[in-house]
Amino acid sequence: MKKYNMITDQPGKALFFFALPIIFGNLFQQLYNTVDSIIVGQFVGEEALAAVGASYSLTTVFIMIAIGGGIGASVITSQYLGAGNYQKMKTSISTALISFLTLSIILSLIGLLLNHAILKGLNTPDNILSDAVLYLRIYFLGLPFLFMYNILSSVFNALGNSRTPLYLLIFSSLLNIVMDLVMVRVFYMGVAGVAIATVFAQGLSAVLSFCLLLRTLKAYAVGDSEEEGSGFYDFSMLGNMIKVAIPSMLQQSIVSIGMLLVQSVVNGFGSSVLAGYTAGMRIESICIVPMIATGNAVSTFTAQNLGAGRPDRVKKGYLAGLGIVAGFAAFICIVLTLFHSNIVNAFLESGSDQAAYDTGNGYLSFIAFFFICIGLKAITDGVLRGAGDVVVFTLANLINLGIRVAFSFGMAGIIGVQAVWIAVPIGWTTNFLISFVRYLSDKWSQKKLI
């Protein structure tokens, strides 16, 4: 496949072919957790699936925090790359790696100390609590590997190389599947086995990514004038990264934080409903991947072109991004409408409670029609984030989150668990409209981070 230049090639083609490996890579990342759910649901049982699902909302928040942090780093790196300042580009990369490794270790320790209390606070059913705690404890042990892989992937994307993360994810996803089956079917380790398999596969990906990055950076020659004053860590760069990273973490995490905050609503309906919700939630997480990944590609496209002084190309890329997500949304709607029952059945063992099937099917048959909403939101947020114009889109994402939580808690007692997924497109649409007004103002094109 030809490698397109984000600054010189036709915006639509450059964006699409850059986004494709990101989409496939993120799909393989979701495959980790989806395979865990299918294997424990089919070979261990409904309660084991519910236990993994009880942990899923929280673990996904950490995945999205890592991705958001990587985006914060990649925006700065992309802008230096677009400006041709390779020494500062390298300094921004090392600054990001050191900072987010430190953060991941701190979060890992906090998670290990509080995982039981968090699950109790989420009203996790007693019959699955011990398995959920075990899964989460193992997951937190591997959190630094998860963070490092996602930061490294974002760095590769910032450099215009979205293929290397994809190849590594394909390898580690296949390794994860094999290890899942061995741990569950050969060693009968159940929930613990799938957690160990995931951590090992992600850890290996992180190590290989770091080695490949070191080799990649050697290709960027640094001039004599750039060498003066160069460093390995820069606090001013870290400050600029944080300005973009915190809103990006929120934007990436908004779906997962919403899932986490409404988890107690779902848990209150019992483990069978939770199992069906888990199946639907996994599929939703896969379906939003093309939208989020294309939005992240738009962010890199925006950062590189603004760094090169080409805001006109950003607007063309924005329109191209909208077309891409519209196509994905139509395809997803058709697939889920026709096959949602078959998809849910793949997660549940024969003989599972009817409430599990009804919940999963109700979730997917409704949400199938609304993925265009998150697509529009992701593309618009991507432009604002890539420009470093973060205040409005942060507010938009907070309102999105507030709507989801308030509607779920307020309406669950009236219309049942369906309130949890009805709230989702309402939040997505509101988020998009707020960010779109900011995009139309054109103020984002005047922002400077470097």
Image: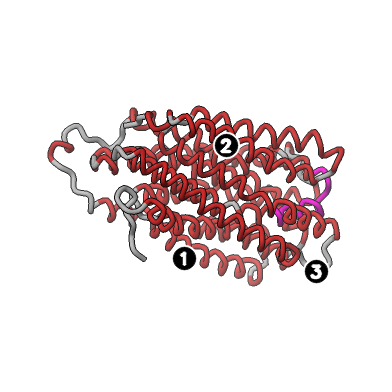
Residue carrying label 3 = 350
**Where in the figure is residue 332, as x and y percent of width and height?**
63, 59
Label 2 belongs to which residue?
Answer: 110
Q: Quadrant of residue 373?
A: top right
Look at the numbered disc 3 and give the secondary structure of its residue: loop
Of residue 172 and residue 329, the one placed in the foreground of this image is 329
Amino acid on which the number 3 mark rests in the picture:
Ser
Residue 384 visible from this viewpoint: yes
Left or right of residue 234: residue 396: right
Residue at mark 3 to residue at mark 1: CA–CA distance = 31 Å
- Graded by Cα atoms within 10 Å as few (under 14), some (14 to 19) or many (20 or more), the crowding at tag 3 reads few
The answer to whether one can see residue 206 in this image is no
- Cα distance, mark 1 to mark 2? 30 Å
Horizontal side of 111 relative to 45 (left or right) equals left
Q: Position of residue 289 (x, y in %)?
A: 56, 53
- Quarter occupied by residue 259: top right
